[in-house]
Image (cartoon, rainbow, N blue to C red):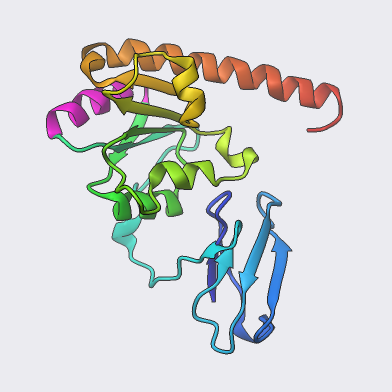
Amino acid sequence: MEIVCNSCQAKLNIPDHKLPKGKKASFNCPKCRERIHILATATPTATGLTGEKPAVSTAYDASDKPFDFVEEDKRTALICMGGEAARTRVSDALEDMGHAVTWAADVEQALTRMKYHLFNVVVVDDRFDIPGNPGVLETLRSLGMASRRRIFVALISERFRTLDNMAAFHQSVNLVVNGKRLDDIKKILVRGVQDHERFYAVFTDSLKATGKA
């Protein structure tokens, strides 16, 4: 059975005979060490992962992967926005910042992209997710802290002012950009990403200094 860790998106292959029938099992992900919970059944075709959510278990399709090849130190970005003009502005800004960029046409494709790759930057329009259904923002919120802090999440919204830190906190994102300020999106993203990297550089150094990293 193929299992995908919700925290770091690592793909694991567990022999069916090692899964207890009718019992719950759990183990630490060998990559990120987050706890993975498996809801085993008599016929193990679906499992629950971190947070007891249904597992994604589908046949491998090479076209689902967001990139054919990315250099080892190349930063990557995922754009979840409707509207070609707005998406192009954001894509151009991220490419100018040195990111390899891909975009998703809908929530299903976005979640598939995220299954195969841990992006450095995710830009989401708040109209992209379908209300009442698990979407990109909810998936990002459910990530373990070790993985989530590696991702810079920018929310495009008509409801909030650009750089509204309180709105960003309540939406569990790193940055809010008003949709009317896309002409300045590169300057806004550069500032946000730099602040994010500086903050976590200090955070990581502090953990190392205390022996926790």
Measured as percent of width and height from the top left, residue 188 is found at 36, 13
Query: What range of the chain is rendered magenta?
Result: 84-98
- Residue displayed at 27% across by 45% down: 104
Compared with 163, 61 (above or below) is below
Q: Is residue 16 left or right of residue 123?
A: right
Report the quarter where the C terminus lies: top right
Measured as percent of width and height from the top left, residue 155 is found at 37, 28
Compared with 158, 102 (above or below) is below
Most foreground residue, 205 or 80: 80
- Residue displayed at 59% across by 62% down: 52
Residue 93 belongs to magenta span: yes
* Residue lying farthest to the right in this orientation: 211
Q: Is residue 55 left or right of residue 133?
A: right
Report the quarter where the N terminus lies: bottom right
Number of marks drawn: 0
* Residue lying farthest to the bottom in this orientation: 42
Most foreground residue, 96 or 21: 21
Residue 80 belongs to magenta span: no
Measured as percent of width and height from the top left, residue 135 is found at 38, 49
Q: Is residue 32 visible?
A: yes
Quadrant in the rendering for residue 35? bottom right
Q: Is residue 97 visible?
A: no
Compared with 194, 102 (above or below) is below
Magenta: main secondary structure equals helix
- Residue displayed at 65% across by 87% down: 21
